[in-house]
Image: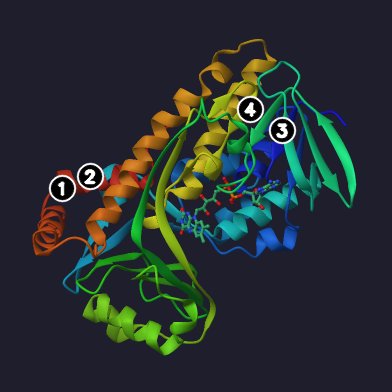
Amino acid sequence: MRCQVAIIGGGPSGLLLSQLLHRAGIDTVVLERQSRDYVLSRIRAGVLEWGTVEMLREAGVGARMDAEGFPHDGTYLACRNEGFRIDFKDLVGKQVMVYGQTEVTRDLYEARDQMDGKVIHGVEGVVIHGADTDAPHVTYTLDGTEHRLDCDWVAGCDGFHGVSRQTIPDTVLKEFKRVYPFGWLGILSETKPVSEELIYAQHSRGFALCSMRNAHLSRYYVQVPLTDKVEQWSDDAFWDELKRRIPAEAAESIETGPSIEKSIAPLRSFVAEPMKWGRLFLVGDAAHIVPPTGAKGLNLAVSDVHYLYHALVQAYQGDDHGVTHYSEQALARVWKSERFSWSMTGLLHRFPDRGDFEARMQEAELDYLQHSRVAQMSLAENYVGLPY
Ligand SMILES: Cc1cc2nc3c(=O)[nH]c(=O)nc-3n(C[C@H](O)[C@H](O)[C@H](O)COP(=O)(O)OP(=O)(O)OC[C@H]3O[C@@H](n4cnc5c(N)ncnc54)[C@H](O)[C@@H]3O)c2cc1C
């Protein structure tokens, strides 16, 4: 088989890249290890930057998001059980959209079906060959038979544990990482969200977040030690802990109910450089991970797709500038989002290895944020997403 761009990974970044390139007349094949149902069952991100919203519209997959998503003009931060609001619209004239990653992925799969896009599920043993030559190819096994896919370029959209990053030699690749000494215990419950906007709460017992997917589906998180296991946390224990950490008014009015999903996610910051090796590009989680505190993971994947999509379109028009400089261009934005996610994590979590002085520093910073329009503008500008 032959195509112009072989895409490894059918998560949001691989599907979006495939959809945009197809609309520009560039032929792709997406190779995905899991089944479609498995990919669609993953509960992950929920907050879209406005640049992401516009990219999804540009890809022709914005209709359901525009009808069913929730534009948010601001968010709440809380400290010592009292909250204050950051008004994005007033501060920087922009919004974010609450629309789940599962829905984004579903819309992308449907759009790929409508255009007869090639997404091959259940592939095993993907190997990228000759990425540093002018004629790369990919081999994989499907139902026990080995296949070969020849291509001009390979887009590694296969997440943190994929093969693409591992294809780049150790002598070329440099990895930067920070592992945080805690995780997030998250639940999904079919209850009315406690607030119309997200509440990020800093508390001496640890961080908490009140988020949502729609008017009847809430997503809540509490910071937990990495040693905790999901089985240790009954629904009642979760709700009790959440209520202790959020503003009193929210705790009193919160609607509780059984969880329909419960999981613990570790928090880490990670960047791999460069994001291009020969004719192989790294996109999204294959190249970088952020702690979810700044709601940047999915949005960063989309901004990588933005740069790569435009670079490939230019390359097929005879201009190699974009593909040559993809790594520098993408990384400049990646590092700024890494910084924001790291600083939000530092501001809002309880670090077991830090003492009372650092706790006071966090409180002072939140107090400053509450009363300084300049500080709020900086947070808002980063939260809604820096320009591409
Ligand atoms: C538990 C969890 C919770 C998260 N919560 C949030 C959040 O609240 N907010 C936020 O902004 N971000 C969150 N994220 C991050 C966000 O979901 C990711 O940034 C986003 O999914 C990145 O998209 P991607 O397409 O680059 O990678 P992925 O979504 O990881 O997709 C990669 C795809 O490649 C496939 N694949 C992997 N290896 C191979 C292979 N060898 N061959 C073929 N296919 C392969 C995988 O099956 C997968 O479908 C969360 C992530 C996780 C893991």
Q: What residue is disc 2 on? A: 377
| Amino acid on which disc 2 is placed | Met
Q: Along the line of sight, which residue is nearer the eye, 133 or 243?
A: 133
- Of circles 4 and 3, the one toward us is 3
Residue shown at the point (37%, 36%) measured from the top left: 335
Counting from the top left corner in percent of width and height, residue 372 is at 12, 49
In terms of sequence position, does the residue under pointer 4 or pointer 3 come before the other?
3
Q: On the rendered image, what quadrant is the C terminus found in?
A: top left
Mark 3 vs mark 2: in front: 3
Measured as percent of width and height from the top left, residue 244 is found at: 26, 81
Tell me whether the residue at label 2 lies in contact with that at label 1, contact meaning CB atoms closer than 8 angstroms: yes
- Kindly tell me whether residue 314 is visible in this rendering: yes
Quadrant of the frame with the N terminus: top right
- Secondary structure of the residue carrying tag 3 is strand
User: Label 1's element?
Assistant: helix
Image position, residue 374 (x, y; %):
16, 43
Q: On screen, 231 above or below 320?
A: below
Select label 1 or label 3 by which is in front.
Answer: 3
Pick the front one: 253 or 132: 132
Q: Earlier in the sequence, mark 4 or mark 1?
A: 4
Under mark 4, the amino acid is: Leu
Give the alpha-carbon distance from disc 3 to disc 2, as whole Å: 44 Å
Residue for badge 1: 373
The quarter of the displayed image where residue 195 is located: bottom left
Ligand 1 within 8 Å of disc 2? The answer is no
Query: Mark 4 and 3 residues: CB-CB less than 8 Å, in contact?
Result: yes
Residue at point 44%, 83% (across, down): 232
Q: What secondary structure is found at the residue carrying circle 4? A: strand
Q: Which residue is mark 4?
A: 280
Circle 3 sits on which residue? 128
Of labels 2 and 4, earlier in sequence is 4
